[in-house]
Image: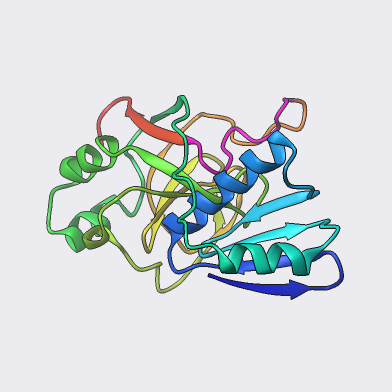
Amino acid sequence: MRALPVGDEALLVEVSSGEEAQALHTELLRRRAEGSLSVREIVPAARTVLLDGLPDPARLAAELTASDEPPTPPRAREVVELPVRYDGPDLADVAAHWGVSAQEVARIHADTEFSVAFCGFAPGFGYLTGLPPHYDIPRRATPRTAVPAGAVALAGPYTGVYPRSSPGGWQLIGTTDAVLWDHTRVPAALLSPGTRVRFVPVGSP
């Protein structure tokens, strides 16, 4: 673990894996909730956690890097189920890359329990992990200029759902009608770091 100062009131903590970043994020949220950590924002990413609004970043950096104890594993949360039609235009390409049928891609994906590792790219967009490493898949060689809202997509080790229409280079395998971001809802984002997610098939690929 490495802690790097960012300005006068922030700290970027680097760890060696996404699992460690999720666990550290959960532990820091727990400490803030119990009152033992004063911080305004805690933002996880692929292998980092950013803490902003710290009264004494240097003190926390020394504490975190001196600890021999691993972060507390993420606590279980209720599972968010997203209905999905496995009808994406890249489903056949993903099937070919995996060496299985389109129906098997849908089965593998729907049988997996995912966890939101971190959020970014667009409001409501979560980077979901859970598929074994041998299912990693490259992005498209040529990104699309517009990916529709609700598109369920794969890239590298991640699954994501586009909350709104935007350009994108991920492999599109399905579609959901779930609303990922609604500014009138509290919270506005359906998915947040640590949320457990399952995709529930509707119809056939």
Q: Residue at x 46, y 24 (%)?
A: 78
Q: In this image, 179 relative to 200: left or right?
A: right
Q: Can you tell which quarter of the image residue 141 is in?
A: bottom left
189 is within the stretch colored magenta: yes
Residue 149, position as x, y percentages in the image: 56, 42
Q: In this image, 193 relative to 11: left or right?
A: left
Residue 42, position as x, y percentages in the image: 69, 51
Q: In this image, 114 relative to 148: left or right?
A: left
Q: Residue at x 43, y 64 (%)?
A: 17
Say above or below: 142 vs 124. Answer: below
31 is within the stretch colored magenta: no
Q: Nearer the viewer, residue 58 or 161?
A: 58
Say above or below: 84 vs 4. Answer: above
Say above or below: 176 vs 2. Answer: above
Q: Main secondary structure of the magenta part?
A: loop
Q: Nearer the viewer, residue 26 or 166?
A: 26
Q: Can you tell which quarter of the image residue 140 is in?
A: bottom left
Residue 51, position as x, y percentages in the image: 72, 58
**The C terminus lies in quadrant:** top left
Q: Residue at x 57, y 59 (%)?
A: 45
Say above or below: 168 vs 183. Answer: below
Q: Residue at x 43, y 42 (%)?
A: 115
- The magenta region covers 185-195
Q: Nearer the viewer, residue 89 or 163?
A: 163
Task: Give the number of callouts.
Answer: 0
Residue 184, position as x, y percentages in the image: 77, 26
